[in-house]
Image: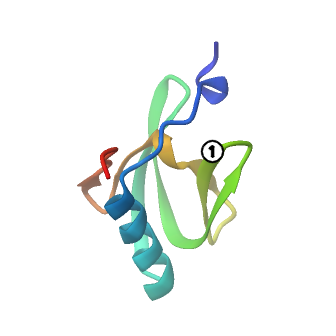
């Protein structure tokens, strides 16, 4: 099964809240995330947080879309899963 087809793992509530705060404040973010077998970095302003096909995503101002459970860190803050 490819990584994109794996079940979504919900992220921590406080982590999601922080992503929302970055979006509302239009804070420029450096997002380290998994992309298949590799790890990459995307930079931009979070313009949308949304759910699709039983998973949650963020969209950056340049159009980049990242599945939230693929995030490694945002602005140096490691991803958490516990609420």
Dividing the picture into quarters, in which one does residue 14 lie?
A: bottom left
**What is the total number of numbered labels drawn onto the structure image?**
1
Farthest residue to the front: give it: 83
Picture coordinates of residue 63 (x, y %)? 69, 63
Q: Residue at position x 67%, y 55% from top?
A: 51
What secondary structure is found at the residue carrying circle 1?
strand
Picture coordinates of residue 60 (x, y %)? 59, 66
Farthest residue to the right: give it: 53
Q: Is residue 3 above or below residue 63?
A: above
Disc 1: which residue: 55
The quadrant of the rendering that contains the N terminus is top right
Q: Does 36 sit left or right of 83 as displayed?
A: right
Picture coordinates of residue 68 (x, y %)? 51, 49
Picture coordinates of residue 27 (x, y %)? 42, 80
Dividing the picture into quarters, in which one does residue 6 lie?
A: top right
Q: Does 38 sit left or right of 65 as displayed?
A: left
Farthest residue to the bottom: give it: 25
Depth order, front residue of 68/32: 68
**Coloring basis for residues:** rainbow
Depth order, front residue of 63/53: 53
Q: Residue at position x 42%, y 55% from top?
A: 31
Q: Does 22 sit left or right of 2 as displayed?
A: left
Q: Residue at position x 42%, y 62% from top?
A: 16
Q: Is residue 21 above or below residue 76?
A: below
Depth order, front residue of 80/44: 80
Q: Is residue 61 above or below residue 53?
A: below
Crowding near the residue tagged with mark 1, few <14, some 14–19, many ≥20 C-alpha atoms within 10 Å:
some
Q: Does 78 sit left or right of 32 as displayed?
A: left
Q: Residue at position x 46%, y 73% from top?
A: 20
């Amino acid at each position: 099964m490819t990584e994109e087809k794996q079940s979504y793992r919900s992220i921590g509530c406080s982590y999601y809240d922080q992503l929302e705060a970055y979006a509302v404040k239009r804070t420029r973010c450096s997002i380290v995330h998994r992309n298949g077998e590799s790890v990459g970095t995307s930079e931009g302003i979070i313009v949308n947080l949304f759910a699709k096909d039983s998973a949650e995503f963020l969209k950056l101002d340049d159009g980049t879309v990242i599945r939230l459970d693929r995030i490694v860190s945002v602005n140096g803050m490691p991803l958490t899963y516990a609420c």
